[in-house]
Amino acid sequence: MSGRTGPAGPASPPSPRFAGTGRLTRLILRRDGLLLPVCVSGIAALLAITARDLKVLYPTAASRQSVAARAGGNPALRFLLGRLNGTTVGAFLAARWAVWGSAFAVLLTVFIVIRHTRGDEEAGRLELVGSAVVGRQAPLTAALLTAGPVNLALALLTFGWLAVLRLPAAGSAALALSIAGCGLAFAGVAAVTAQLATTARGARGLALGALGAAFVLRAVGDAGSTANLSWLTWVSPLGWVESARAFGAAGERWWVLLLPLAASAALVAAAFALAARRDLGAGLLADRPGRPAASGLLRGPFSLAWRVQRLMLAAWLAAFGFGFAACGAGARGAGSILGGNAVLRRYLLRAGYQATVINAYLSALMLLAGLAAAVFATAAVLRLRAEETGGLAEPVLAAATGRIRWALSHISVAVGGAALLLAGAGLAAGLGYGLLTGQVGTQVPDLVGAALARLPAVAVLAAVAVLLFGLLPWASAALAWTAVALVGVIAVFGPPLQWPAWLMDISPFTHVPRLPGAAVTAGPLLWLGGIALAAGAAGLIGLRRRDLGDLGPAGLGGLGGPVRDRLADHFFPPAETL
């Protein structure tokens, strides 16, 4: 027998770099077996609904030509949606969906790659599986092997839906493949950021920052009135989707599909090279050393919660300011386009509960701001559950800090941050619209007030998350996000489809004043505030009485036991199976 021997027997040969990749891939599919099909199907279904609506709204070539003439001359609309490459239904679909559908695919891809690389590494799971026969590059490889088929499935499902709607096969294939290609390009981006940052939040922030930069480059290149800036579109992966010219009058550019594939290959190779050079748990971007003693602002739970969540709030605020300024600037052009179509006009007036198209558009815009602020507030409240399960709550509660103060610290960031986001959305939209109409002094206060009128409804959804965290902690995340999704569906689809009143009343946004352009009534706002206080108080009482770290009767919400047990089943099989 060759090789060194020690007290434990013969020394094992070093593991190959990719050993265990197959088992890790199967584990990822098992952990996300429900989420991934739902997300892929949802993105493809949204595209199919958009395509169907476009066929209904613009059935004739003359109607599409009229819209194309008005939209093509509006820089704000080109900034938001991109350029039109024709006047067919398919060209309209590509202009409306290519950029935003690609953004959805990117978000899903970034979630997959970072969750199963840097996220598992930060939580200590990769250290556990690394002690078995698992190669150094296996986790990254498994995450990429999952992200690739997910984007391929999205492309196939998208192509299938468009074929059912009888759109041209060539354009359908170009649109589906370009969206999937953009997702693959950002799989490489996420793989690189997972090696650079030391936390999953930092890696996601870098990847989403790259997505924001890609959107800005594409938008500036499209909105420019001259060719001097059009080259910026070619620098952005989102611009490549548009440059493929799906359903274009001059034909598709198939060679453009090679650009995201080349970028993905280069970035993935860079990620593997970076992964080989760093230590487990470390990032290549060194953490900034802190001060030897904490400042006076960090001596309480409120300042600590603010410090933990301030970067997320800053990113949301920047996105709100940028997005709603662009939407406000496009109000006049969107109003003229939407008002020219009888079906769209009726839809918008019902969704905005207004008598004029512009007020309906601005009201719907502020509703969108409220729904987005509710997403932030829910995420900020659920940070409590993340700290509880991650073991970060115990050091805070070991000091002179009670559970109620700890919970209120994050709740205050959630509600206060939502108020700041709503005010920022109103200010940005008011400036964007007011500067074009010369009515800044009127539009800014009107839209800031219209946005803040949605705050009580946002507070209700945040309070629902608090209630679930206090009473059903093991299911709080799933149920809280389900509540946000339900409210969003009711708010967007309920008014134009004239759903029954009892169903509409489930959404708190149904009861807020439909500003701008409507009367302000204090009664509903007070009722919503009272409901939020009652639900939040009940959640805090439940938190005070339950055990900390409660996983519920089935463990982790009935998923069949802790993730650590699943990892052990995969990588430490019983002796009789070896």
Image (spheres, rainbow, N blue to C red):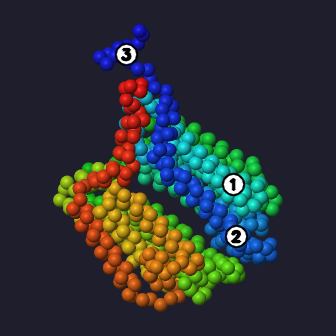
Corner quadrant of residue 543: bottom left
Task: Estimate the x, y position of residue 453 in percent, counting from the top left.
Answer: 43, 81
**Identity, as a three-letter code, of the amino acid under mark 1:** Phe
> In the image, what residue occupies the spot 58% across and 56% down?
41
Residue ID for mark 2: 54
Residue ID for mark 3: 10
**Identity, as a three-letter code, of the amino acid under mark 2:** Leu
Mark 3 and mark 1 residues within 8 Å of each other at the beta carbon: no
Vertical comparison of 417 with 262: above or below: below
State which quarter of the image contains the C terminus. top left
Task: Estimate the x, y position of residue 340 in percent, counting from the top left.
Answer: 71, 81
For the residues carrying marks 3 and 1, which lies nearer the camera in this image? 1
The answer to which of marks 1 and 2 sits earlier in the sequence is 2
Task: Estimate the x, y position of residue 329 in percent, counting from the top left.
Answer: 60, 76
Q: From this viewpoint, which residue is outermost toward the bottom?
A: 519
Residue ID for mark 1: 159
For the residues carrying marks 3 and 2, which lies nearer the camera in this image? 2
**Identity, as a three-letter code, of the amino acid under mark 3:** Pro
165, 457: nearer the viewer: 165
> In the image, what residue occupies the spot 28% across and 53% down?
550
Give the Cα separation between the discs numbered 3 and 1: 55 Å
Examine the rendering and report whether any part of residue 281 can be seen. Answer: no
Mark 3 and mark 2 residues within 8 Å of each other at the beta carbon: no
42, 8: nearer the viewer: 42
User: Crowdedness of circle 3 by 10 Å Cα count: few (<14), some, many (20+)?
Assistant: few
Q: From this viewpoint, which residue is outermost toward the right?
A: 250
